[in-house]
Amino acid sequence: MKDFKQEVTENSYFRQEELVFWDCDREKRMRVAAMLSKMAAFAGYDYDARGLTHEKLYAMREVFLLSRAAVKIHACPRARDLLDITTWENGARGAHMQRVFEMRDQAGRLCVSAKSDWILVDPLTRKILRPGSFMAKPLTVCPVEIDCPEPKKIVLPKEGVEDLGHRTIRWSDLDGNGHLFSGNYGDIVWDALPEDLQPRVPREFYINYSKEATLGEDLRLAGFREGDTYRMEGMGPGGPCFTVLCVFGE
């Protein structure tokens, strides 16, 4: 069997991964939750390969929290597809540090592209740090144009919103940081979408991560549909936990 490839360059990290059934929905198409999970994983792979593990960054009191992301699906990957996934840092914008991604098939076709904005935080005080204070390594800028919209703020209108029920955070939702894993938001959203939208592949997906959700917290879900778009919000005890925008259609 052929070994999967991986490569670290001065400003990128590349690795091949095969999609398994867990990554895909009942139609054997890659779930948005799996796309978000790959993005979080590859951000970690990149820094791990450079010796900047989570433990080392924590000791330096410089850790990253995902703030928002945008995903563009050009051709949805399917189960057993082998993907070439590459990630790059992409400089800083205000308080955010950006990381971008491409997922390509073995013919070189672009399947998924994404942009994500992160904030730098002192893990002990939870104080937000300016990107200029990041001392672990110099930030680099992606040398290629990423075919994906920028992440953006998402809000629901004050009227016309539908109640989608509640979602309690369970043990299996948690990651090693003790809160709801960033990839799991995709499954929470899809479980609450209208039935006619659940089997459809979005053209674009946007998410804002506002407050962490922990074990036992109850999220109140609300949605708003407008044509081929659907917005959803998860409200926790301390305010909005997440907000998403799903763009369907051609």
Image (cartoon, helix red, strand yellow):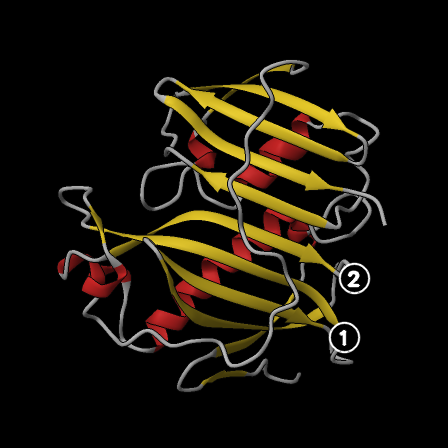
Is residue 56 something one can see in this rendering? Answer: no
Q: Residue at x 39, y 86 (%)?
A: 10
Residue 114: image location, x then y, percent: 59, 60
Name the one closer to the observer, 163 or 182. 163
Q: Classify 156 as above or below 26.
A: above
Q: Which mark is residue 75?
A: 2
Residue 11 sits in quarter:
bottom left
Residue at horizontal 55 percent and vertical 26 percent from the top? 233
| Element at label 2 | loop
Q: Taking the image as drawn, is residue 192 in sight?
A: yes
Image height of 98 relative to 220, above or below: below
- Crowd band around label 2 with a 10 angstrom C-alpha radius: few (<14), some (14–19), many (20+): some
Q: Is residue 74 above or below residue 250?
A: below
> Hey, what amino acid is under mark 2?
Ala
Dot 1 lies on which element?
loop
- Where, quadrant-wise, is the N terminus in this rendering? bottom right
> What residue do we see at 64% from left, 31% from top?
231
Position of residue 203 in the picture relative to residue 162 (left or right): right
On the image, which quarter does residue 112 sit in? bottom right
- Where residue 29 appears, as percent x and y from the top left, is 77, 52
Q: In screen coordinates, is 129 left or right of 20?
A: left
Q: Amino acid at mark 1?
A: Arg
Does the CB distance between marks 2 and 1 fall below 8 Å? Answer: yes
3 left or right, relative to 63 = right
Residue 187 in percent (x, y) is at 61, 37
Mark 2 or mark 1: name the one nearer the start of the chain.
Answer: 2
Q: Which residue is mark 1?
A: 109
Is residue 112 or residue 97 the one in the foreground? 97
Image quadrant where residue 111 sits: bottom right
Whether 149 is drawn above or below 181: the answer is below
